[in-house]
């Protein structure tokens, strides 16, 4: 059995992405008629890297930017989320190797300002990093969220 790829290898492997196609099936039912962009991992990483210290973004904002960039109606939420996880994992590998300048994945939130348990170090690590940058992390039911995250959203 071949060893699995590192996150850095996954980040570098664009396969045949980005690709824009007509919405079909369940995605058409969910979003209506139009087109959908399936982004490349490097595109998601690029947008995550642009978020400066003290600012935030969300996966949905990244999706909006990618849809606009490609002239598509929407960006695939599943693939965008997977690619954000890959970018975060690659940054974690970079940090483990001693690199200081990595993709600031902790600044990318899920919808509603929710922290991402799948990022390196889980919610605890993301919360620690966000607090260090001046954000207030609170519990909302079982979820951890950045309070008033909308005020810190990064302009495109």
Image (cartoon, rainbow, N blue to C red):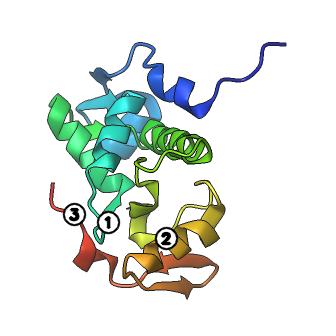
Dot 3 or dot 2, earlier in sequence? 2
Using a 10 Å C-alpha cutoff, classify the residue at mark 1 as few (fewer than 14 neighbours), some (14 to 19) or many (20 or more). Answer: many
Residues at badges 3 and 2 in contact (C-beta under 8 Å)? no
Residue under numbered circle 1: 56
Circle nearer the viewer, 3 or 2: 2
Identify residue for label 2: 129
Percent across and percent down for residue 141 are: 60, 84
Q: Nearer the viewer, residue 113 or 49?
A: 49
Q: Name the spot of residue 32 as percent of width and height, x first.
A: 29, 40
Disc 3, disc 1: CB below 8 Å? yes
Assign a secondary structure to mark 3: loop
For the residues labelled 2 and 1, the Cα–Cα distance comes to: 12 Å
Q: Nearer the viewer, residue 132 or 71?
A: 132
Crowding around mark 3 (Cα neighbors within 10 Å: few <14, some 14 to 19, many 20+) is some
Check the image and name the residue furthest to the right. Answer: 1
Classify 10 Å Cα crowding around label 2: few (below 14), some (14-19), many (20 and above): some
Tag 2 secondary structure: helix
Q: Residue at x 55, y 48 (%)?
A: 95
User: In the image, which disc is placed on residue 122?
Assistant: none
Q: Residue at x 46, y 61 (%)?
A: 106
Whole-number angstrom distance, CA of label 3 to CA of label 1: 6 Å
Query: Would you name the residue on which mark 3 appears?
Result: 154
* Residue that appears at 77% across and 19% down: 3
Which image quadrant is residue 69 in?
top left
Q: Which is nearer the N-term, disc 2 or disc 1?
A: 1
User: Could you tell me how many numbered marks the image carries?
Assistant: 3
Is residue 67 left or right of 124 when viewed as pictured? left
30 and 155: which is toward the camera: 155
Q: Is residue 103 above or below residue 148?
A: above
């Amino acid at each position: 059995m071949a060893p699995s790829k590192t996150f850095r290898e996954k980040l570098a492997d664009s396969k045949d992405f980005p690709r824009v196609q007509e919405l079909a099936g369940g995605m058409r039912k969910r979003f209506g008629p139009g087109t959908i962009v399936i982004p490349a991992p490097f595109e998601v990483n690029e947008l995550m890297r642009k978020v400066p210290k003290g600012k935030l973004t969300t996966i949905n904002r990244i999706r909006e930017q990618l849809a606009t960039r490609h002239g598509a109606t929407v960006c695939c939420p599943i693939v965008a989320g997977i690619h954000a996880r890959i970018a975060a994992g690659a940054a974690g590998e970079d940090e483990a190797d001693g690199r200081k300048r990595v993709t600031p994945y902790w600044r990318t939130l899920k919808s509603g300002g929710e922290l991402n348990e799948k990022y390196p170090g889980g919610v605890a690590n993301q919360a620690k990093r966000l607090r260090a940058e001046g954000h207030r992390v609170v519990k909302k039911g079982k979820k951890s969220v950045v309070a008033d995250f909308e005020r810190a959203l990064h302009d495109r």
